Amino acid sequence: MPHPRSVRRRARATALGAGALLLALAGCSAPASEPATAEARDWDDVLADAEGQTVRLWMYGGDDQGNAYVDDVLAPAAAELGVTLERVPIPDTGDAVNRVLSERQADVTDGEVDLVWINGENFATGQQAGAWLCGWTSMLPNMAYVDTDDPLLTSDFGLDVDGCEAPWHKAQFALVYDSARVEDPPGSVAELLTWIEEHPGRFSYPAPPDFTGSVFVRQVLYELAGGVEEVPLQFSQAAYEELAPELFTRLEQLEPSLWREGTSYPQDLGALDELYADGQVDFTMTYGPATLPDLVADGVFPTTTRVLLVEDGTIGNASFLAIPSTSGSRAGAMVVADLALSPEQQFQKARPEVWGQYTVLDPDRLPAEFRARFAELPQSEVLPPYAELSAGADPELAAEWVTALDEGWRRQIAAG
C-alpha cells in the first residue's frame, strides 16, 4: 500500500537523472563557444532594470517542499523587489538545458528560460556550448556571505564555476537505515557491502542514471579504488578502463544478495523510499538528509530511521542557479539569485518544515542575528548536524565520470 508522500520524488539535489546520456550527446553535438559575459554594473542599476521583469525559473518539479518554498516564500519576496517569479516545473533539468541550446542555435535573445536550478552534467553541457551568462555572480551583494574559497562552491563536478552560476544549497550523500531492523549497522562502505551479502534481499539502490543510484555507484568506486586519492577527479579513458572493471564486477557479485536477487532495481529514489517505508528493505539513501526528520514526523518513515555515519565520509556537492545567455530578463534573474542567497531566504529554506536544504552561507560571515537563528534550527536524533555529517566529505568526480559510469552500469549490470 502506498504511504503518504512515499512516492514523492525528493529533489535530486543536483537535478541530474534520466537525461544524462541525452545531454552528453547534446553537448557533443553543440558547437563549443565562448560564454556571454555580463557587463559589470552598479547593483542599484540592476535593481532598476529588474523592476517589472518576469523571471521563469525552470526546476525539477517532483519535490513538493521545493515547489512550495519557491511559490510561497521565494516568489513573494521577489515580488517585493518588483520581480515576478514564475516556477516552471520540469521532469528533468535536461529539458531546460535542451531548450536553451535550441534557443541559442536559433539566435533567440528573449527565451523561455531565465533561471535554472542546475549542476553537474547539465551545467557542463551548457558550459561547453556557451549557454550560460558568466561573470555576474561577483555583482551579487549577498555573495559577501559566501566563502569563495569553499571547493564545493567554486567547482561543479570538477568544472570551474567561473562566475557562471550562483550557489543555492549544499547536499551530502547519506545512507539511511532502520535501527530497529539493523541492530549492528556497518561503519564503512566496505562493511556495508559485506552486510548486504550477509542479509540477502534487504538492500537495493535506484538504477542509474537516477541521481541517487548514480552517486551510490560512485561511492562504491571510491571504496574499491582504495579512497578518493586513487581516483582522478578529471575523467580519462585510461583511468576508467583501470578502475571500472573491478567496480562492475563487485556490483555483479552483489546482485544475488539484493532485493529480488537483483533481477530488478527501483526505478528512482521514490521507489526505493517506498520499499524502505514498507519494510521490504532496511536501507534507503538520499542526497538531502535534512528532509528525513520531516518524513519521520509525517509517518512516512519509521521513527527508528537513522543516518549511517561512514568513517571515511561520503560524497558532497552543491547545486546552483544559472542564467541562460538567451534570457531576456537577466537583471531580474540576477535579483532572484541574489535574493535566494540572502540570509533570510537561506534560513527559511534550511528549516525542515519548509524545505530542509543545507545553506551555502559561511556562518562566520553572517550577522549575529542569523548566526543565532541558524544555530537554533531544530536538531533531530534521526541525523547528525551537517558539520558532523559532512566531515571528511568526498569530492564529486567530473561530469564525464558520471556519464561514463552510468552508461557502463547500463551495459554491464542492467543488460547483464
Image (spheres, rainbow, N blue to C red):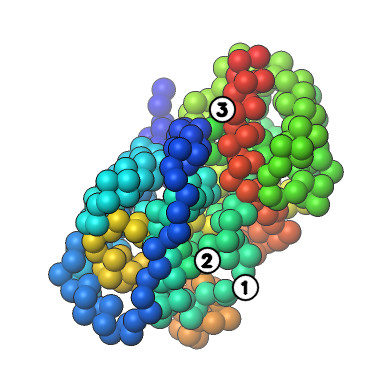
Coordinates of residue 5 in the picture (x, y in percent): 39, 37
Q: Earlier in the sequence, mark 2 or mark 1?
A: 1
Q: Which residue type carries mark 1?
A: Asp
Residue 108 left/right relative to 123: left
10 Å neighbourhood of mark 1: few (<14), some, or many (≥20)?
few
Between marks 3 and 1 in the image, the one whose residue lies nearer the viewer: 1
The residue at which mark 2 appears reads as 162
Q: Residue at x 64, y 17 (%)?
A: 262
The residue wearing badge 1 is: 149
Label 2, residues with CA under 10 Å away: few <14, some 14-19, many ≥20 = some
| The N terminus - image quarter | top left
Taking the spot 57% from the left edge, 17% from the top edge, the residue there is 264
Residue 189 vertical position relative to residue 266 in the rendered view, above or below: below
Position of 318 with respect to 384 (left or right) is left
Compute the Cα span from label 2 to label 1.
Answer: 12 Å
Q: Are marks 2 and 1 in contact (CB under 8 Å)?
A: no
Closer to us: mark 3 or mark 2? Answer: 2
Judge whether 33 appears above or below 83 on screen.
above
The CA span between labels 3 and 2 is 32 Å
Q: Nearer the viewer, residue 18 or 7?
A: 18
